[in-house]
Image: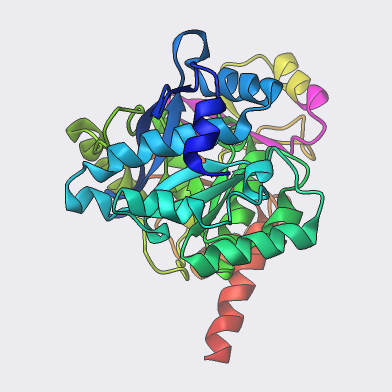
Amino acid sequence: MSFHSSSTQAPAWLWNGDEPSVTSVFQPIVDLLHGKVIGHEVLSRGPGQWREATALFHQARMDGFTWELERACWTSALRCISTLPAEQRSAPFFFNVSPDVLSDPRFGDGSTVALLARYGLTPRHLVLEITEKAAFEDHALIQRLTRQCAAEGFGLALDDFGAGHSGLVTLVHSAPQFIKLDQALVRDIHRYSYQQHLVKSLVNFAASVDAVLIAEGVETWDELAVLLRLGIRHVQGYLIARPAPTPVLPTTEFETARHKAMRALDFREREDDETVGSMIIRRLCVDESLPIDELHGLFREAPQLDHVVLLHGEQPKALVTRQRLLERDEHPLVVEDRMAITTLARVAMKRGPETLYEPVVVVDAQGRFLGTVTMRQLIHRATELLERRVSR
């Protein structure tokens, strides 16, 4: 089915003759190390009651017009992109593609590439975001389709990673260049150590397969600071910029704050960063005035909770562990985030037997609490670094 014949059969809320009824907005994806925009996600807005994408696509699925909606979204976006200055067109544009559209024979029959060519574009201008929320049941099919798209020149991204049950399987079979963390993994990550551990492991995985990991839905500086410390380098979300009818750059205010965050982190581009800052997990912390019974209640309510840091303002004052629940360690080992990991390992192992396996409290240059590092983390990482040096 050609583009024109499909559009003429669609309802007016999708197409008005050959004119798409949907509009496009763009949201930048930023490299935090340099402050540069590496691409823009293209989002669609429908008319009237279908303005939000979820309502728009739901209605299209219900009425059997998913393909026609996809073509309307693409046509609207490509028209906008074709009018942009050359320097803005050079960055890739991320397009969401559902599995049912990607597997539709019409997607690979040449009409998609022809549609791009109509607006002076090629597949190399686009990254196809395959959403994890809709599963591919046929693993051989996704492998064949993604290889075909890559051969044509499209970039590939796995969207909403962590949101559904099929993410790891889809990841294995599609081998994407970009992995986009679902907002659920990003939201309030500074409050939850479990999320931080998971994201840290994904950072290491992405680096090992040479994929770009992008955190979606970043809305607060607390979230961004923790993501940076975990090794996330590319982000997208309201904190950076809201979706706009034409591609935008981050504001001057964002740039100023980004520079400040980077300086505080002492971010290193090398993957073999040897500072404690690269290992920090933000743990539960409470004011030092919290009554002892409420403190004990925190441990009862959260069986996975290993320790709590007591703060005076932003500065750590004591440590309480599950193993020594009745005692407050008023003098825990506190180090700056710039200390070398191997140095800290030697310092930590010199502690007495009562506190030898307690976590290490990490602060910034101003003494503000950043998080903690467990001895298990420390020994594991120090061993890796020493083995790496021996093998060189």
| Relative to 255, residue 48 above or below | above
390 and 214: which is toward the camera: 214
| Relative to 389, residue 115 above or below | above
Percent x, y of residue 135: 75, 43
Would residue 290 be visible to someone looking at this image?
A: yes
Horizontally, is 209 left or right of 125 in the view?
A: right
56 and 381: which is toward the camera: 56
Q: Is residue 274 magenta?
A: no
Res. 267 image quadrant: bottom left
Percent x, y of residue 363: 44, 44
Percent x, y of residue 41: 41, 40
Q: Residue at x 46, y 9 (%)?
A: 48
Q: Is residue 311 magenta?
A: yes
Percent x, y of residue 217: 49, 32
Protein image colouring: rainbow
Q: Which residue is drawn at 45% across and 56% down?
A: 113
Which residue is situated farthest in the top direction here?
49
Horizontally, is 359 left or right of 224 in the view?
A: right
Would residue 346 be visible to someone looking at this image?
A: no
The quadrant the N terminus occupies is top right
Q: Residue at x 40, y 69 (%)?
A: 270
211 and 369: which is toward the camera: 211
Q: Which residue is drawn at 46% across and 33% down?
A: 73
Magenta stretch?
299-316
Callout count: 0
